[in-house]
Amino acid sequence: MEQDYLALLEKHHRGAPDTERARMVMSYQSQQVPRAREYLSKVGGADFLRGLRVLDVGHAYGSILYAALEMGASVAHGVEIDQTNEPFARALLRGCDTDKYRLSYGDFLNPNVREQLLAEYDLICCDTVLEHVQEAFHMVSLMAELLSPGGRLHIVVPNFYALDFLDREPHSLDPYLSLADTVHWGQIVPNPPDAFPRFSGDYDAMFNALGLEPSVVRTRDESSLGPWLDKARGLLAALPTSGVKDWGGTIAHRLRRMIAYAERRKEKWPPNLIAWHYYQTFWTWIVRR
């Protein structure tokens, strides 16, 4: 139940240092259920989930599974690599029909883990997970194999070009920035298919290579790079005193490269690309077979 989940969160954070970072994380975790409802609403209408089989790859606290059952899904299964999240997911799903949900723990790329799943699902969710997975191409191909005919794959990845990873998007702070600096700039990792996608176009190319049909979900309509450049320069100037962990220069290096890249393209890109690449906090695709 949602109140059990929130009570466990409060207990978990009780006694922790009252830092801005801790408050960001607590706020992020406590908003997972409303965010899951919004996430699922983008895929279809109010009743589209009724009777569908749903799989969430990287289910974390179980919020998408909970919201899917709430919206009428007949099955809600999850796979999560971090078993420390299990108590939160169990607390949230307490009171739900145990015949309808299943929590599996381990690496989705492991065949033994996938053996615990159904042969196919009508909707497969992968919310802010692929950015942590080097074998993204392989992972998406495995998810596509589990889609029923006409099924949909809903993928969301954080867009750090939107700069929110520095001031209000805690999910991406630690694991993403510590992993992805050299990967993002393509210095040591081979080209796709088996590499971290770097730009939204890399994800599009991956979907196309797998014979999938992606459509994007746009939520921003900004048309000018000027405000973005002002914010990026301000963040770069403030880094020494902002309290943001710089990961040995990673963030400063990234911001300089991003600013240089944007400067070269500010007169060339149409407004829809500017909004998608520089202002949309999460890149979101609904993918069909």
Image: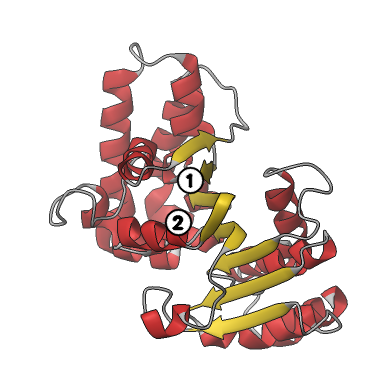
Residue drawn 48% across and 16% down? 271
Figure check: 82 above or below 22: below
Q: How many marks?
A: 2
Q: What residue would you read off at disc 1?
A: 289
Q: Which quarter of the picture shows residue 270?
A: top left
Instruction: Kindly state the secondary structure of the residue where label 1 is placed.
Output: loop
Q: Is residue 246 visible?
A: no
Give residue 163's position: percent from left, percent from top: 47, 43
What's the amino acid at mark 2? Answer: Ala
Q: Is residue 278 left or right of residue 201?
A: right
Image quadrant holding the N terminus, namely: bottom right
Foreground residue among 20 and 264: 264
Q: Position of residue 192 (x, y in %)?
A: 22, 49
122 horizontally vs 262: left or right: right
- Toward the viewer: 261 or 35? 35
Residue that numbered label 2 is attached to: 144
Residue beneath the point at 31% across and 19% down: 265
Q: Position of residue 160 (x, y in %)?
A: 43, 46
Label 2 sits on a secondary structure element that is helix
Residue 106: name its quadrant.
bottom left
Neighbor class of circle 2 (other Cα within 10 Å; few <14, some 14-19, many 20+) is many
Using residue 253 as the reference point, say whether residue 204 is left or right of it. right
